[in-house]
Amino acid sequence: MLEPDVEARPWPEQLALDDAAYRAQLAYLLDRSAFYREKLGGASALSLGGLAQIAGLPLTAKDELRATCTSDKPFGSHLCVAPEEIARIYSTSGTTGTPSYIPLTAGDLDNWVTGSARSYAAAGVHAGQRLLSTYNAGPFAAGAALAAFDRIGLCHIPVGTGNTDRLVRAIETIRPEAVVLTPSYAAYLAESFDLRGSSVERVLVAGEPGGGEPAFRAALEERWGARVTEAMGIGDIGVSLWGECEEQDGMHLGARGFVHAELVDPDTGDAIEIVDGATGELVLTHLRHHAAPLLRFRTRDHVEVRTHPCACGRTGPRIRCIGRTDDMLIVRGVNVFPSALREVVSGFAPDVSGHIVVRPRAGGVKQAPPLPVTVELAQGVAENPALAEAIRERIRNVLVVQTHVDLVPWGTLRRSEYKSRLVEHDRGSE
């Protein structure tokens, strides 16, 4: 562990510390944030209580914050510090609209790096080892994770995205013990190059769901000849907030002390108790943030919780990301996550490559069955109607959804050097 006194602290003690931090953070918000003063109805929110009563406060959605932004106020009505206190500004990708800007004070940034360092160190990398990264330093928040590698004491080899030949040459020449990249890029590299004999012992994946899917992970580990662990963050709250240890049984909260986690029903917003096996949308609250702290922020990540003790000695709940509620489709009342479809399909290796695409027939979330799923065959495997039927039947049994499975030859589906799109809507249906 990078910080055993923190990471192995008994969870009740951590919650007691977090409760005090939360009360102070809430008072700070009501004093400094015009957005939250209006949203919470003034100082009366302070009388509600501590973390045990946090579900009594409203959830915060990204669109609410974005709606307060203007050309004169790029951070909206929520900025809580003077402009000269801002030490770093990141932006989101803007794939769903205008990019959002994320201001950080020097203290905020240090907390981000601290939590991220704990998350990545949990994977087993340690000072003195070489790590090759494919994250770009900016403008996106993932760039903040690069400082975490320095904090751990790693010899950091930054390559960035879009430099596959250079990356492979660096692995061959500099012989790093670890690489960090998205699951999609890890799969692309392993498919395109023989990496089983490389120096890489650990593949650290983040940026999208997939690294925790058993079948997908097994395929990556076999092709890389290395252990695969995942990390997860969200730009508005912090990078690499969660990180998986070598037990590979869910991601630990590396940002403990800085962030409080809840589960809610994605449809109703009602709180869900955090117990072993619980699933729901992840909601996060800053505890020690200054520039633009968020309260009960909806991440749109659908997760599964693990609370049984972990052999690594770290305490507190762990999570595995099932998928993004943004990508979720509803087929006759059944919630379908594309990443869950990929996990089922990956179980048919070595006959399939592991690449899939869902192509809904209608615009929007609700779809009529059968849901069209395109599955790419492995190299050299011929199309087989019996295989398509077996995949369709397995999906029906596991996910309780009717699909139409279309098998396509190897190399048909697009590869990505960053994140894969598992859902492709027909423009005419939107």
Image: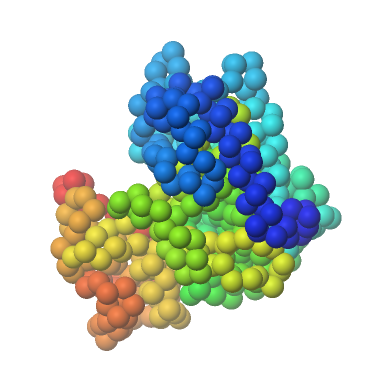
Tell me where residue 89 sits by quadrant: top right
Q: Is the residue 300 above or below the residue 111 in the image? A: below
Camera-side residue of 368 and 342: 368
Residue 99: percent from the left, percent from the top? 43, 31
Query: In the orientation shown, which residue stands out farthest toward the top?
Result: 72
Q: Give the farthest residue toward the front.
A: 47
Indicate the quadrant containing the N terminus: top left, top right, bottom left or bottom right. Answer: bottom right
Residue plotted at (36% across, 65% down): 356
Q: Could you tell me if residue 310 is visible in this image?
A: yes
Residue 412: horizontal and vertical position, in percent? Answer: 35, 64
Q: Quadrant of residue 273?
A: bottom left
| Residue at horizontal 54 percent and vertical 22 percent from the top | 31
Nearest to the observer: residue 193 or residue 101: 101
Q: By what rule are the colours in the image chosen?
A: rainbow
Q: Residue furthest right?
A: 128
Residue toward you, 241 or 425: 241
Task: Say how many tags the image has.
Answer: 0
Residue 321 percent across, percent down from the top left? 47, 60
Would residue 266 be found to the left or right of residue 172 on screen?
left
Q: Who's the residue at 45% across and 17% down the image?
A: 73
Which residue is painted at 43% across and 79% down in the image?
347
Left or right of 153? Residue 221 is left
For this rendering, which residue is in front, 87 or 348?
Answer: 87
Name above or below for residue 25 compared with residue 202. Answer: above
Q: Position of residue 266 (x, y in %)?
A: 34, 53
The vertical placement of 18 against 356, above or below, is: above
Residue 213 can be seen, yes or no: no
Please identify the residue farthest to the bottom as the structure is shown.
386
